[in-house]
Amino acid sequence: MKTATITDFRQNIRKHLDEIESDQDILIVSGSKKRDFVVLTLETFNAMEETAHLLSTPANAAQLMESIAQHKAGGAIIKNIDGNLAAAENIATSSHRRKVARKVKKNRSNLSGSKRRTAKSTRKSK
């Protein structure tokens, strides 16, 4: 978390905003008369809002903490939005995660393409 005075922020606004964006950091701007401000990207704000929502009920918080513990223990399973298993192996490295994500994306696009071809051939045969 970075800090700046209101005067420094005004004089170097572009520099501060670029740093906040590139570092995904938060800037505390100290104003006069104990008026302090927080400057952050919309992406960071949305992530904070989502986290607050997910932790807003004890049941959600417990489930999230259990999922984090499973992930840290190496028991993560990637599923697509429909709940079908996309990869059931342990995800240990980020490069492996990217490779799995590419495979899942490719499989989804292949599946979508075969569904389109099937739909077109069904229409032609009618």
Image (cartoon, helix red, strand yellow):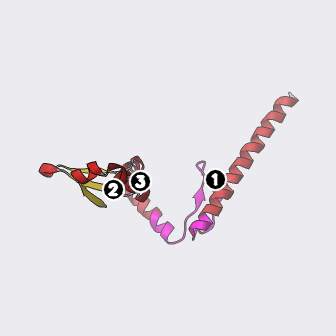
Tell me if residue 57 comes above or below residue 100 in the rendering.
above
Which residue is drawn at the image coordinates 58% and 49% (left, top)? Answer: 81
At label 1, which amino acid type do we have?
Answer: Asn
User: Residue 96, position in %: x, y?
Assistant: 62, 67
The nearer-to-camera label among 2 and 3 is 3
Q: Is residue 28 left or right of residue 18?
A: left
Disc 2 element: loop
Disc 3 element: helix
Residue located beneath label 2 in the image: 26
User: Residue 86, position in %: x, y?
Assistant: 65, 57
**For the view shown, which residue lies furthest in the left direction?**
33
How far apart in space, not on screen, are marks 1 and 2 (Cα)? 38 Å
> Is residue 125 in the magenta section?
no
At label 3, which amino acid type do we have?
Answer: Glu
Name the one closer to the observer, 56 or 58: 56
How far apart in space, not on screen, are marks 2 and 3 (Cα)? 9 Å
User: Residue 115, position in %: x, y?
Assistant: 75, 41
Disc 1 element: loop
Residue located beneath label 3 in the image: 21
The nearer-to-camera label among 1 and 3 is 3
| Crowd class of label 2 (few under 14; some 14 to 19; many from 20; radius 10 Å) | many
Tell me if residue 27 comes above or below residue 75 in the rendering.
above
- Can residue 57 be seen by looking at this rendering? no
**For the view shown, which residue lies furthest in the top direction?**
126
Residue located beneath label 1 in the image: 84
Tell me which numbered mark, 1 or 2, is placed earlier along the sequence.
2
Q: Which residues are magenta?
A: 68-97
